[in-house]
Image: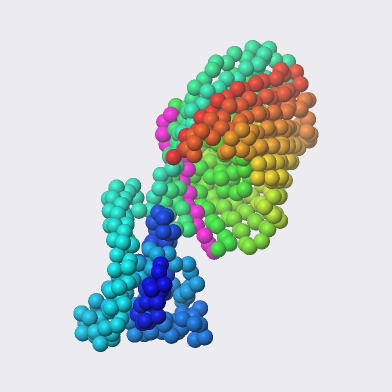
Amino acid sequence: MTKAFWSLLKISPLVMAATFVAANSTLAAEINEPVNGVAQISQESNSMGQVTSVSQFSDVQPTDWAFQALQSLVERYGCIAGYPNGTYRGNRALTRYEFAAGLNACLDRVNELIATATADLVTKQDLATLQRLQEEFSAELATLRGRVDSLEARTAELEANQFSTTTKLQGEAIFNVSQAFGDRQAVRTGSPTTDLNSNTVFSDRVRLSLLSSFTGKDQLQIRLQGRNTISNTGVTGTNMSRLGFDGNENNNVAIDKINYAFNFSDAVRVKIDATGAELNENVNTFNPDFASSGRGALSRYGRFSPIYRQAADGAGITVNVNPNGPLTFSAAYLSQTQGAISASNPGDNSGLFNGNSTFFGQLAFKPNKAFNVGLSYARTYQNTPNLFQGTGSITANNPFVGTPRTEANHYGIQATFQASPQLALSGWAGYTTADTVTGPSRSADIWYWAASLGVRDFGAKGNVLGVIFGQPPKVTGGSGGVASESGTSYHLEGLYKVKVSDNIQVTPGLLVIFNPENNNNNSNIYVGTLRTTFTF
């Protein structure tokens, strides 16, 4: 701008309005950009209001150099707006577009004063100055009008064609090509005798989530799912070969998850699950690169600690308390669905409190961005033992003869260490002690552990190279006739997540199970997988 232009600003307080109003008027706030930038809608555009006295601004003092100009603008011309928290923010940077917007707002105010027979408030010198300013900024004003018209047209189009004012649609589709192979099918005890015959399969899983918010800080989730990825257990003889996204309903679509989450306070988040509750989706699992079923580890065991498998597909409540500081506390009560036994069934051994249930608590400590550790505890009651929901050996999931009702205490420690932005180490270890509630008194001790390494941006930005190694759940002892499993299984998984785009990820990988079913007589089992995940 020229020196002559800036000299105009000394002529009148009304001229100063174009500067001060520009930073705080409703119209100015809607265009917040550099001169050569693209207009963006400000989140504060609807949050400012007219003030009647300069004393209403908590951050404007009589000693400020612009106090008199502001006082004149507010009390003489009524040509200024402020923020709802009572601030003016006079030090905010000003662009030429904002100046033009403020000038236009003041011109509208002048026209209003003239129309209401109060023209004596506006001097001839004021009008002459404003006319010269309008001529100086005629190009910017024309551009501003064009941009506003364009925004109005785009807003009208979005409002006319939007899916919902409160609901967003999120989707995920998995295409999977995989095959399990090895010499013999695994057996729990003794030596295997059946050849492992498996075919290459092509399967899918599709999820559509309706995410609704009514206050801006809450979320109602309704998820639809259809899939036909059959578990490898039938051909390999062991759950240890399962993929992390398997399940089969012959692609019949059904509602598999309904929940509502809201903030009880700034530090407390509450989630109520009506169905489909999963601890791994409600609390931190300390395996950020591999926890997701669609974009994480390929295997079931490689995703996270089995302690988070408790209360799968149930109903209940989860509370996460995250005050300012390094500590986070999570607590949950979930009623687990198992066959016909569910929270919605009023029959015997069912319902919200009389059926399968889980009490869960977790304390997490994160002293810095690099390190995070959690201590977890779960107390479970099951009418039919399935201690880890099909994760680990068949014996570890039901260490007892028959199907007695079972109580179990689960203890876990999990940690994540971000050695650098490109390198992450995660791991977990867990111990479970289970006891029968019906039938002969028996107990079992079960141990498991695993570690994972994620190398981010390997080969290209967004790619992740991963290695996961561990020991799936194994019975190590007990009482009442429960003995330790004879061998020890080891889980080794290598995968490479390739980011094709923001919405497409391709993940090839290989899963190797050494001594499956914790039986040293079993031969190793391999599962090769190519997973492609589409998100939208």
- Note whether 217 is above or below 122 in the view shown: above
Residue at 66 percent of width and 37 percent of height: 455
Q: Position of residue 29 (x, y in %)?
A: 40, 65
Residue at 44 percent of width and 59 percent of height: 34
Rendering colour mode: rainbow
For the C terminus, give its image quadrant. Answer: top left
- Note whether 526 is above or below 172 in the view shown: above
Q: Which residues are magenta?
A: 251-265
Q: Quadrant of residue 327?
A: bottom right
In this rendering, does residue 239 appear at all? no
| Along the viewing direction, whichever of 108 and 41 lies nearer the viewer | 108
> Please, what is the dominant secondary structure of the magenta stretch?
strand
Residue at 78 percent of width and 33 percent of height: 476
- Note whether 43 is above or below 520 in the view shown: below
Looking at the rendered structure, the number of numbered marks drawn on it comes to 0
| Along the viewing direction, whichever of 27 and 288 lies nearer the viewer | 27
- In the picture, measured across the screen, residue 510 lies left or right of residue 536, that is right
